[in-house]
Image (cartoon, rainbow, N blue to C red):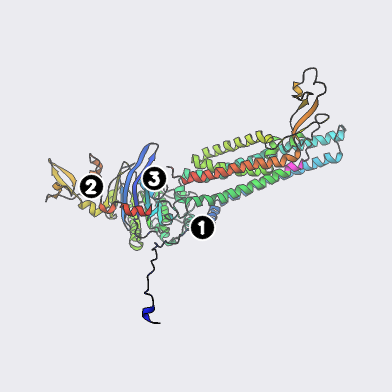
Amino acid sequence: MIPGSAALEAVELTLRHRRRTLLDACSLRLPRGAVCGVVGPNGAGKSLLLSAAAGLVGPDSGRITVLGRPAGSAQALPAVGYLDQRRSLYRRMTVAELLATGRRTNVRWHQDRALELLGLGRVPLDARIGALSGGQRTLAALATVRGKAPQLMLLDEPLAELDPLVRRAVLGLLLADVADHGATVMLSTHILTDLDEVVDHLVLLDAGQVRLAGQLSELLTAHRFVDRDGSSVLVRRERPDAAAADADGPTLDELVVSYLHAPGPGRWLAPGMRPDAPHGALIA
Amino acid sequence: MSVDRMSAPTLEQVPLRVREERPVRVGLLAVTGEALHHHRRLLALLGLGLLVLAGPVLTTADSVASAHSAWSAANCGGARLADVCQALNLDLTGAVLSAEDVQLALLAVPLLVGALLGAPLLAREYEQGTYRLAWTQAVPRGRWLTGRLLVLGGASVLTGAVAALLGTRLYLAASPAVLRESSGYAPLPFNSFGPVLAAGTVLAFALGVLCGALWRRTLPAIAASVAGFGGVALLLTALRGDLQPARTIFPPHGYDLRPDDWLMADGVVTTDGHRLSYAQCEPGGCPAGSRTFEIYHDAGQLWATQWTAAAIMLALAATALLLSYRTVGRNRL
């Protein structure tokens, strides 16, 4: 991969389907080693952003690169792992056959890492995929992602069907990959409580637009509640009235809800997640 | 050598090149192996199907051949109406009729290959969403498609070739034709042997792949590919008389072609050069002094006609596969 490149960079990424704009000029840059939560209401474009990063849907305009390569290109594919929302697997394969297929269709394959994930849900290797429970199927799909040892993991609702114990264990393994191998994780979810302790970056999507993106600490410290006409209003810190001494910082929940309910097109990209044009121009 | 006479060392400027990682990739051989493994059950089924088909074709060919040689040995040509000849003729007619059933089964080979090998290749992946898994491993989807086409397309070529050989055995068993129905130009035999059947199988496969790429659902893709191939086959069958130049002769009497020749038109040429079909001759008979003419395809042109039709089908198949690559490459939502 191109050294020094961002894990993911989208510039004015736009996707349309039958005159509906599903992703609307999304721009963001995710640094390497980040664990990034993608949140937003249903239909916000979370899944679409991830599948665009996986190279499955192409931009109608703008561009998206992963690890410095065009998404979905032959150079990008070996280093990117993708878990789709529906866990699309060949139903008639056994779990063992699924792993064997992963081994044959990838440049690197770490059977131990795949097996480690399957062990969390006691997924039997000789079971057919079609016979697995929803959670086990998720684990099987995650196993193919992790066996590939990708530098960037794009995980669409990875925790949705897992019970709380397994959920914690899966997150533990993913975080270990980030810590030990410098992997980057981008995961979508609509359960914010999953994320608080795990993610260090956040992207909030709404109606196909990036409303908020940045390092978590950066986002939280950049916003303050101020008292205005008797009600508490969230404002960005650079605004003069936010400097008031008694200003409170928001929680993650409050921040997200405030942006989703903002009357105007509230939108803010922390400096660390803004794609910088000159670097981007080199790749294109 | 003194130091001062040495030229000062100049540092040559080497343009700095960003070191690229060696492109790591899963080679086509491995991709093809994976496709072979993935479709192993389907391929086994296909082999079994061919064996099941071969039995009746070969036994029918044998009975046609023996009826045909018995007829030829009896030298019943011309107008001999002996009882023996009548019995032999009945035998031969029966054998040729039962061969037609088998030839119909051979016609189904391209349709089945298109429906079972071609159409599901992409449609199933789209329908079940598994393309999202298949195309996000390290293999780019173009190479993935090439692997699948090499395996399933190769199987189609083999199937088409075997079916064509079986059909040819059946056709040759009744050759030279005694009955007009077993002429290689007749619609049923024409489509059930030789290059036409082999190329038709490949075309049906390719159309199936393309329909799968376009419709993205298995059943509509199967229906579309069957309709598409059926349409092309009917069109080529209708046009088979135009694929090679027809010959015109002016024989002393009409109706003297062999059953293997294909009469396109006949009639008379009047003394002033006009051609009239027999039906156009006035009730009083054809004008005095006119000569008979026959426009026909010679039996010897049959293989050239077959190869021409096959070449058209192969060109269409190649086009369909190219379009499939393009459709798959587009990131359609």
Asked if residue B176 lies in the magenta stretch, the reply is: yes
> Please, what is the three-letter code of the amino acid marked with disc 1?
Gly
- Which corner quadrant of the image does residue B314 belong to? top right
- Is residue B41 shown to the viewer in this render? no
* Residue A159 screen position, x and y as percent: 35, 51
**Sequence-earlier tag: 2 or 3:** 3
Out of A262 and B283, give the one closest to the viewer: B283
Which residue is under mark 2? A255
Left/right of residue A195 with respect to residue B190 in the rendered view = left
Q: Are marks 1 and 2 in contact (CB under 8 Å)?
A: no
Looking at the image, residue A230 lies above or below residue B284: below
Is the residue at mark 1 from the same chain as the one at mark 2? no
In the rendered structure, are the residues bearing label 3 and label 1 in contact, judged by CB atoms less than 8 Å apart? no
* Residue span colored magenta: B170-177
Residue at the limit of the structure toward the front, as seen here: B5
Q: Amino acid at mark 2?
A: Leu
Which mark is in front, 1 or 2?
A: 1
Chain letter of disc 2?
Answer: A
Q: Please say whether residue A88 is visible from this viewpoint.
A: yes
**Mark pair 3, 1: CA separation:** 28 Å
Question: Is residue B103 on the magenta stretch?
Answer: no
Residue A72 horizontal side relative to residue B247, left or right? left
Category of crowding for the residue at label 2, using alpha-carbon neighbours closer than 10 angstroms: few (below 14), some (14–19), many (at least 20): some
Q: Position of residue A30 (x, y in %)?
A: 32, 53
- Dot 1 falls on a residue whose secondary structure is loop
**Residue at numbered disc 3:** A59
Viewer-nearest of discs 2 and 3: 3
